[in-house]
Amino acid sequence: MPDQDKDLVHLFVRDLDEIELPPRDRWRLAPRKESLVMKTSRYVLYATAIAAVLVVALIASFTLRGGNQVAASPSPTIAAITTSPTPTPTAATASPTPTAGPAGAITGALSYPSEFIPPLTVYAVSVADQNVLFSVDTPRFGADPSVQPTAGPAGPRPSYTIAGVTPGAYYVFAFRRDTVVGNDIPALYSRFVVDCMQPYEGAQKPIPSSCPNDHTLVQVTVRPGETVSRIDVTDWNCSLPGSTCPPRPR
Amino acid sequence: MPELTVKRWEELYDRAFPQVYRALVAATLDRERALDGLHDAFEEGLQHPPSDDRNLEGWLYRVALRKTRRGLLRALREGFATDLPADDPSAAVLQRLEVGRLLALLTKRQRAIVVAHYYLGFRNRKLRKL
Protein backbone atom coordinates (compact mmCIF):
# COMPACT_ATOMS: atom_id res chain seq x y z
CA MET A 1 0.00 0.00 0.00
CA PRO A 2 1.52 3.37 -0.94
CA ASP A 3 2.27 5.85 1.83
CA GLN A 4 -0.50 8.22 0.71
CA ASP A 5 -2.94 5.39 1.05
CA LYS A 6 -1.63 4.65 4.53
CA ASP A 7 -1.99 8.29 5.48
CA LEU A 8 -5.60 8.27 4.34
CA VAL A 9 -6.26 5.11 6.31
CA HIS A 10 -4.87 6.76 9.41
CA LEU A 11 -6.94 9.84 8.75
CA PHE A 12 -10.13 7.84 8.33
CA VAL A 13 -9.49 5.73 11.38
CA ARG A 14 -8.63 8.76 13.50
CA ASP A 15 -11.64 10.76 12.43
CA LEU A 16 -14.31 8.10 12.14
CA ASP A 17 -13.38 6.61 15.49
CA GLU A 18 -14.61 9.89 16.94
CA ILE A 19 -18.14 9.11 15.89
CA GLU A 20 -20.06 8.49 19.04
CA LEU A 21 -21.58 5.05 19.47
CA PRO A 22 -25.19 4.64 20.51
CA PRO A 23 -25.89 3.38 24.02
CA ARG A 24 -25.12 -0.28 24.40
CA ASP A 25 -28.78 -1.19 24.86
CA ARG A 26 -29.50 0.08 21.36
CA TRP A 27 -26.93 -2.09 19.62
CA ARG A 28 -29.32 -4.96 19.36
CA LEU A 29 -32.66 -4.83 17.77
CA ALA A 30 -35.23 -3.49 20.17
CA PRO A 31 -38.59 -5.27 20.16
CA ARG A 32 -40.65 -3.83 17.37
CA LYS A 33 -43.01 -1.19 18.61
CA GLU A 34 -46.56 -2.21 17.94
CA SER A 35 -48.98 0.46 16.90
CA LEU A 36 -52.49 0.61 18.29
CA VAL A 37 -53.86 -0.51 14.92
CA MET A 38 -51.52 -3.49 14.80
CA LYS A 39 -52.35 -4.43 18.36
CA THR A 40 -56.07 -4.17 17.68
CA SER A 41 -55.70 -6.20 14.49
CA ARG A 42 -53.84 -8.86 16.41
CA TYR A 43 -56.56 -9.13 19.02
CA VAL A 44 -59.27 -9.21 16.34
CA LEU A 45 -57.36 -11.98 14.56
CA TYR A 46 -57.05 -14.01 17.75
CA ALA A 47 -60.73 -13.54 18.54
CA THR A 48 -61.73 -14.56 15.00
CA ALA A 49 -59.56 -17.67 15.16
CA ILE A 50 -61.00 -18.68 18.53
CA ALA A 51 -64.55 -18.05 17.31
CA ALA A 52 -63.90 -20.11 14.17
CA VAL A 53 -62.59 -23.02 16.23
CA LEU A 54 -65.61 -22.84 18.52
CA VAL A 55 -68.03 -22.76 15.59
CA VAL A 56 -66.34 -25.75 13.97
CA ALA A 57 -66.40 -27.63 17.26
CA LEU A 58 -70.09 -26.82 17.76
CA ILE A 59 -70.99 -27.92 14.25
CA ALA A 60 -69.03 -31.14 14.67
CA SER A 61 -70.64 -31.76 18.02
CA PHE A 62 -74.18 -31.26 16.70
CA THR A 63 -73.49 -33.33 13.61
CA LEU A 64 -72.18 -36.26 15.59
CA ARG A 65 -74.87 -36.05 18.23
CA GLY A 66 -77.73 -35.69 15.77
CA GLY A 67 -76.64 -38.70 13.75
CA ASN A 68 -76.95 -36.71 10.57
CA GLN A 69 -75.12 -37.49 7.41
CA VAL A 70 -71.45 -38.02 8.04
CA ALA A 71 -69.16 -38.55 5.14
CA ALA A 72 -65.99 -40.28 6.08
CA SER A 73 -63.24 -39.97 3.58
CA PRO A 74 -60.35 -42.08 4.71
CA SER A 75 -57.57 -42.70 2.29
CA PRO A 76 -58.23 -45.57 -0.01
CA THR A 77 -55.92 -48.48 0.48
CA ILE A 78 -54.55 -51.04 -1.88
CA ALA A 79 -54.20 -54.00 0.35
CA ALA A 80 -54.89 -57.64 0.44
CA ILE A 81 -57.97 -58.72 2.27
CA THR A 82 -57.31 -59.61 5.84
CA THR A 83 -57.90 -63.18 6.81
CA SER A 84 -59.17 -62.37 10.26
CA PRO A 85 -62.44 -63.88 11.36
CA THR A 86 -65.27 -62.19 9.59
CA PRO A 87 -68.29 -61.04 11.52
CA THR A 88 -71.21 -62.53 9.63
CA PRO A 89 -73.45 -59.84 8.24
CA THR A 90 -76.82 -60.35 9.83
CA ALA A 91 -80.07 -60.40 7.99
CA ALA A 92 -82.10 -59.45 10.98
CA THR A 93 -85.47 -58.09 10.21
CA ALA A 94 -85.09 -55.32 12.76
CA SER A 95 -82.51 -52.94 11.40
CA PRO A 96 -80.25 -51.49 14.05
CA THR A 97 -80.20 -47.74 13.81
CA PRO A 98 -76.71 -46.20 13.80
CA THR A 99 -75.88 -45.44 17.37
CA ALA A 100 -73.19 -43.64 19.26
CA GLY A 101 -70.14 -45.59 20.40
CA PRO A 102 -66.69 -46.37 19.12
CA ALA A 103 -66.78 -46.28 15.34
CA GLY A 104 -66.23 -49.39 13.30
CA ALA A 105 -65.03 -50.03 9.80
CA ILE A 106 -66.06 -51.93 6.71
CA THR A 107 -63.51 -53.44 4.38
CA GLY A 108 -63.62 -55.72 1.38
CA ALA A 109 -62.51 -56.42 -2.14
CA LEU A 110 -63.35 -54.59 -5.32
CA SER A 111 -63.73 -55.92 -8.82
CA TYR A 112 -64.94 -54.87 -12.24
CA PRO A 113 -65.68 -56.92 -15.35
CA SER A 114 -62.60 -55.73 -17.22
CA GLU A 115 -58.80 -55.58 -16.98
CA PHE A 116 -59.03 -52.61 -14.68
CA ILE A 117 -61.20 -51.20 -11.94
CA PRO A 118 -62.41 -47.67 -12.51
CA PRO A 119 -62.29 -45.09 -9.74
CA LEU A 120 -65.19 -45.77 -7.41
CA THR A 121 -67.00 -44.32 -4.47
CA VAL A 122 -67.94 -47.05 -2.05
CA TYR A 123 -70.94 -46.22 0.10
CA ALA A 124 -72.24 -47.69 3.33
CA VAL A 125 -75.83 -46.50 3.60
CA SER A 126 -77.74 -46.98 6.80
CA VAL A 127 -80.59 -49.45 6.47
CA ALA A 128 -82.71 -47.41 8.86
CA ASP A 129 -82.03 -43.98 7.42
CA GLN A 130 -80.70 -43.50 3.91
CA ASN A 131 -79.49 -40.05 4.87
CA VAL A 132 -76.89 -41.64 7.09
CA LEU A 133 -74.04 -42.82 4.95
CA PHE A 134 -70.32 -43.20 4.93
CA SER A 135 -68.18 -43.36 1.86
CA VAL A 136 -64.68 -43.68 0.56
CA ASP A 137 -63.20 -42.89 -2.85
CA THR A 138 -60.93 -45.49 -4.37
CA PRO A 139 -58.47 -44.87 -7.18
CA ARG A 140 -58.32 -46.56 -10.54
CA PHE A 141 -56.65 -49.95 -10.31
CA GLY A 142 -55.07 -51.92 -13.08
CA ALA A 143 -54.10 -51.36 -16.69
CA ASP A 144 -53.53 -47.94 -18.16
CA PRO A 145 -56.47 -47.17 -20.48
CA SER A 146 -54.05 -46.21 -23.25
CA VAL A 147 -52.30 -49.57 -23.05
CA GLN A 148 -53.64 -52.78 -24.49
CA PRO A 149 -54.66 -55.00 -21.59
CA THR A 150 -52.63 -58.13 -21.11
CA ALA A 151 -53.72 -59.32 -17.72
CA GLY A 152 -55.86 -58.44 -14.76
CA PRO A 153 -54.88 -55.95 -12.12
CA ALA A 154 -51.44 -56.76 -10.82
CA GLY A 155 -50.32 -56.81 -7.22
CA PRO A 156 -52.49 -57.11 -4.15
CA ARG A 157 -56.19 -57.53 -4.72
CA PRO A 158 -57.80 -54.12 -4.89
CA SER A 159 -59.78 -53.35 -1.81
CA TYR A 160 -61.41 -50.53 0.10
CA THR A 161 -61.88 -49.63 3.71
CA ILE A 162 -64.53 -47.30 5.07
CA ALA A 163 -63.38 -46.19 8.49
CA GLY A 164 -65.21 -44.24 11.15
CA VAL A 165 -68.53 -46.00 10.58
CA THR A 166 -71.08 -45.49 13.32
CA PRO A 167 -72.31 -48.84 14.65
CA GLY A 168 -75.47 -49.96 12.90
CA ALA A 169 -76.77 -51.86 9.86
CA TYR A 170 -75.72 -50.80 6.38
CA TYR A 171 -76.04 -51.68 2.73
CA VAL A 172 -72.74 -51.45 0.90
CA PHE A 173 -72.40 -50.66 -2.79
CA ALA A 174 -70.21 -48.62 -5.12
CA PHE A 175 -70.63 -46.30 -8.07
CA ARG A 176 -68.10 -45.28 -10.67
CA ARG A 177 -66.71 -41.81 -10.10
CA ASP A 178 -65.71 -41.21 -13.71
CA THR A 179 -68.09 -39.67 -16.20
CA VAL A 180 -68.75 -42.46 -18.64
CA VAL A 181 -71.93 -43.88 -20.07
CA GLY A 182 -73.21 -46.59 -17.79
CA ASN A 183 -71.74 -45.21 -14.62
CA ASP A 184 -75.17 -45.28 -13.01
CA ILE A 185 -75.02 -49.06 -12.50
CA PRO A 186 -73.47 -49.84 -9.16
CA ALA A 187 -71.54 -52.77 -7.78
CA LEU A 188 -73.14 -54.41 -4.78
CA TYR A 189 -72.33 -56.43 -1.77
CA SER A 190 -75.27 -58.73 -2.50
CA ARG A 191 -76.70 -62.14 -1.84
CA PHE A 192 -74.99 -63.29 -5.04
CA VAL A 193 -71.59 -62.26 -3.61
CA VAL A 194 -72.20 -64.17 -0.38
CA ASP A 195 -73.79 -67.29 -1.88
CA CYS A 196 -72.13 -67.63 -5.26
CA MET A 197 -68.94 -65.61 -5.55
CA GLN A 198 -67.17 -65.87 -2.21
CA PRO A 199 -67.55 -69.67 -1.88
CA TYR A 200 -65.81 -70.11 -5.23
CA GLU A 201 -62.98 -67.65 -4.67
CA GLY A 202 -59.73 -69.15 -5.81
CA ALA A 203 -61.48 -72.14 -7.28
CA GLN A 204 -60.56 -73.05 -10.82
CA LYS A 205 -64.12 -73.90 -11.76
CA PRO A 206 -66.71 -71.24 -12.58
CA ILE A 207 -69.71 -70.39 -10.49
CA PRO A 208 -72.33 -73.09 -11.12
CA SER A 209 -75.29 -71.98 -13.15
CA SER A 210 -77.53 -73.40 -10.47
CA CYS A 211 -76.43 -70.65 -8.08
CA PRO A 212 -79.41 -68.38 -7.42
CA ASN A 213 -79.30 -65.16 -9.36
CA ASP A 214 -80.14 -63.06 -6.33
CA HIS A 215 -78.73 -59.54 -6.52
CA THR A 216 -80.44 -58.07 -3.49
CA LEU A 217 -78.34 -56.10 -1.04
CA VAL A 218 -77.13 -57.82 2.11
CA GLN A 219 -77.16 -56.00 5.40
CA VAL A 220 -73.82 -55.45 7.07
CA THR A 221 -73.85 -54.94 10.80
CA VAL A 222 -71.11 -52.78 12.22
CA ARG A 223 -70.52 -53.19 15.94
CA PRO A 224 -68.68 -50.65 18.09
CA GLY A 225 -64.97 -50.71 17.42
CA GLU A 226 -65.17 -53.70 15.03
CA THR A 227 -63.98 -53.98 11.48
CA VAL A 228 -66.30 -56.01 9.32
CA SER A 229 -64.22 -57.61 6.59
CA ARG A 230 -64.88 -59.49 3.35
CA ILE A 231 -67.66 -57.13 2.41
CA ASP A 232 -66.73 -57.56 -1.23
CA VAL A 233 -68.35 -55.08 -3.56
CA THR A 234 -68.08 -57.26 -6.60
CA ASP A 235 -71.58 -57.86 -7.97
CA TRP A 236 -72.14 -55.70 -11.05
CA ASN A 237 -75.31 -57.46 -12.18
CA CYS A 238 -78.09 -55.62 -10.40
CA SER A 239 -79.31 -54.26 -13.75
CA LEU A 240 -80.31 -57.73 -14.91
CA PRO A 241 -84.04 -58.29 -15.37
CA GLY A 242 -85.72 -59.04 -12.09
CA SER A 243 -83.12 -57.19 -10.02
CA THR A 244 -83.07 -53.69 -8.64
CA CYS A 245 -80.14 -51.32 -8.29
CA PRO A 246 -79.95 -48.82 -5.46
CA PRO A 247 -79.87 -45.17 -6.51
CA ARG A 248 -76.67 -43.19 -6.36
CA PRO A 249 -76.61 -41.31 -3.04
CA ARG A 250 -76.80 -37.53 -3.40
CA MET B 1 -20.53 -21.01 9.89
CA PRO B 2 -22.54 -24.19 9.88
CA GLU B 3 -22.59 -24.45 13.67
CA LEU B 4 -23.32 -20.78 14.31
CA THR B 5 -25.47 -20.42 17.37
CA VAL B 6 -27.47 -17.38 18.30
CA LYS B 7 -25.12 -16.71 21.19
CA ARG B 8 -22.06 -16.92 18.94
CA TRP B 9 -23.68 -14.65 16.39
CA GLU B 10 -24.46 -12.09 19.11
CA GLU B 11 -20.86 -12.14 20.27
CA LEU B 12 -19.54 -11.61 16.77
CA TYR B 13 -22.06 -8.87 16.14
CA ASP B 14 -21.17 -7.00 19.33
CA ARG B 15 -17.50 -7.20 18.50
CA ALA B 16 -18.05 -5.85 14.99
CA PHE B 17 -20.66 -3.28 15.91
CA PRO B 18 -18.50 -0.20 16.70
CA GLN B 19 -16.47 -0.29 13.51
CA VAL B 20 -19.35 -1.17 11.20
CA TYR B 21 -21.66 1.36 12.80
CA ARG B 22 -19.16 4.19 12.36
CA ALA B 23 -18.52 3.15 8.77
CA LEU B 24 -22.24 3.15 8.07
CA VAL B 25 -22.70 6.57 9.66
CA ALA B 26 -19.91 7.93 7.49
CA ALA B 27 -21.36 6.33 4.39
CA THR B 28 -24.99 7.29 4.98
CA LEU B 29 -24.50 10.46 7.04
CA ASP B 30 -27.42 9.29 9.13
CA ARG B 31 -27.06 7.60 12.50
CA GLU B 32 -30.61 6.26 12.72
CA ARG B 33 -30.47 4.71 9.28
CA ALA B 34 -27.09 3.23 10.10
CA LEU B 35 -28.50 1.69 13.25
CA ASP B 36 -31.63 0.41 11.48
CA GLY B 37 -29.48 -1.10 8.75
CA LEU B 38 -27.30 -2.85 11.30
CA HIS B 39 -30.32 -4.19 13.13
CA ASP B 40 -31.66 -5.58 9.87
CA ALA B 41 -28.28 -7.11 9.09
CA PHE B 42 -28.20 -8.68 12.53
CA GLU B 43 -31.61 -10.26 11.88
CA GLU B 44 -30.52 -11.45 8.47
CA GLY B 45 -27.45 -13.01 10.03
CA LEU B 46 -29.68 -14.96 12.39
CA GLN B 47 -31.74 -16.32 9.53
CA HIS B 48 -29.12 -16.66 6.81
CA PRO B 49 -25.70 -16.49 8.44
CA PRO B 50 -22.61 -15.72 6.34
CA SER B 51 -20.69 -18.70 5.02
CA ASP B 52 -17.72 -17.90 7.25
CA ASP B 53 -16.83 -15.44 9.99
CA ARG B 54 -13.45 -14.36 8.69
CA ASN B 55 -14.63 -10.93 7.62
CA LEU B 56 -17.78 -10.41 9.56
CA GLU B 57 -17.37 -6.63 9.51
CA GLY B 58 -17.38 -6.71 5.72
CA TRP B 59 -20.48 -8.90 5.61
CA LEU B 60 -22.34 -6.74 8.11
CA TYR B 61 -21.36 -3.56 6.29
CA ARG B 62 -22.51 -4.86 2.91
CA VAL B 63 -25.80 -6.21 4.20
CA ALA B 64 -26.52 -3.20 6.40
CA LEU B 65 -25.70 -0.82 3.57
CA ARG B 66 -28.10 -2.67 1.31
CA LYS B 67 -30.80 -2.48 3.94
CA THR B 68 -30.03 1.18 4.53
CA ARG B 69 -30.35 1.94 0.83
CA ARG B 70 -33.75 0.29 0.80
CA GLY B 71 -34.67 2.45 3.77
CA LEU B 72 -33.45 5.54 1.94
CA LEU B 73 -35.36 4.63 -1.20
CA ARG B 74 -38.46 4.13 0.88
CA ALA B 75 -37.94 7.45 2.62
CA LEU B 76 -37.33 9.20 -0.70
CA ARG B 77 -40.60 7.85 -2.00
CA GLU B 78 -42.25 9.17 1.10
CA GLY B 79 -40.58 12.52 0.46
CA PHE B 80 -38.78 13.25 3.68
CA ALA B 81 -35.28 12.03 3.15
CA THR B 82 -32.37 14.45 3.11
CA ASP B 83 -28.75 13.84 2.51
CA LEU B 84 -27.68 15.47 5.72
CA PRO B 85 -30.49 15.50 8.25
CA ALA B 86 -30.22 18.81 10.05
CA ASP B 87 -31.19 17.38 13.38
CA ASP B 88 -28.74 14.51 13.23
CA PRO B 89 -25.78 15.20 15.52
CA SER B 90 -23.63 12.93 13.38
CA ALA B 91 -23.90 15.46 10.57
CA ALA B 92 -22.36 18.10 12.79
CA VAL B 93 -19.64 15.73 13.92
CA LEU B 94 -18.77 14.80 10.38
CA GLN B 95 -18.73 18.43 9.31
CA ARG B 96 -16.23 19.09 12.05
CA LEU B 97 -14.01 16.21 10.98
CA GLU B 98 -11.62 16.54 8.12
CA VAL B 99 -12.74 13.24 6.66
CA GLY B 100 -16.38 14.19 7.13
CA ARG B 101 -16.00 17.28 5.01
CA LEU B 102 -14.34 15.25 2.29
CA LEU B 103 -17.04 12.61 2.38
CA ALA B 104 -19.77 15.19 2.08
CA LEU B 105 -18.43 16.06 -1.35
CA LEU B 106 -18.98 12.54 -2.64
CA THR B 107 -22.05 10.68 -3.80
CA LYS B 108 -23.57 8.01 -1.57
CA ARG B 109 -22.01 5.19 -3.53
CA GLN B 110 -18.61 6.88 -3.61
CA ARG B 111 -18.82 7.40 0.14
CA ALA B 112 -19.71 3.77 0.70
CA ILE B 113 -16.70 2.63 -1.35
CA VAL B 114 -14.22 5.10 0.14
CA VAL B 115 -15.25 4.26 3.70
CA ALA B 116 -15.11 0.54 2.96
CA HIS B 117 -11.61 0.90 1.50
CA TYR B 118 -9.97 3.27 3.96
CA TYR B 119 -11.80 2.40 7.14
CA LEU B 120 -12.84 -1.24 6.81
CA GLY B 121 -9.92 -2.35 4.64
CA PHE B 122 -11.94 -3.65 1.67
CA ARG B 123 -9.88 -4.46 -1.39
CA ASN B 124 -10.92 -4.33 -5.02
CA ARG B 125 -12.73 -7.66 -5.15
CA LYS B 126 -14.96 -6.86 -2.22
CA LEU B 127 -15.46 -3.25 -3.24
CA ARG B 128 -17.07 -4.44 -6.45
CA LYS B 129 -19.85 -6.01 -4.38
CA LEU B 130 -20.88 -2.67 -2.92
Image: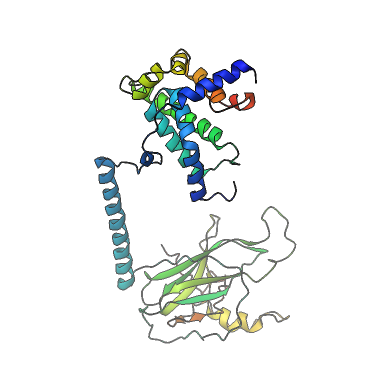
Residue A213, visible in the rendered structure: no
Query: Which residue: 59% across, 20% down?
Result: A6
Say which quadrant the C terminus of chain A sits in.
Answer: bottom left
Q: Position of residue A48 (x, y in %)?
A: 28, 52
Q: Position of residue B9 (x, y in %)?
A: 51, 45
Q: Quarter of the image holding residue A126?
A: bottom left
Residue found at the far top of this picture:
B105
Q: Quarter of the image holding residue A112?
A: bottom right
Q: Position of residue A20 (x, y in %)?
A: 39, 29
Query: Which residue: 45% across, 64% down?
Result: A248
Above or below, comparing residue A73 to residue B65 in the picture: below
Query: Which residue: 45% across, 16% down?
Result: B98
A46 left or right, relative to A203: left
Residue found at the far right of this picture:
A150
Above or below, comparing residue A166 to residue A85 in the picture: above
Q: Position of residue B68 (x, y in %)?
A: 44, 29
**Colour scheme of the picture:** rainbow
A41 left or right, relative to A125: left
For this rendering, which residue is in front, A134 or B63? B63
For this rendering, which residue is in front, A215 or A31? A31
Label count reads 0
Say which quadrant the N terminus of chain A sits in.
Answer: top right
For this rendering, which residue is in front, A153 or B93? B93
Residue B35, visible in the rendered structure: yes
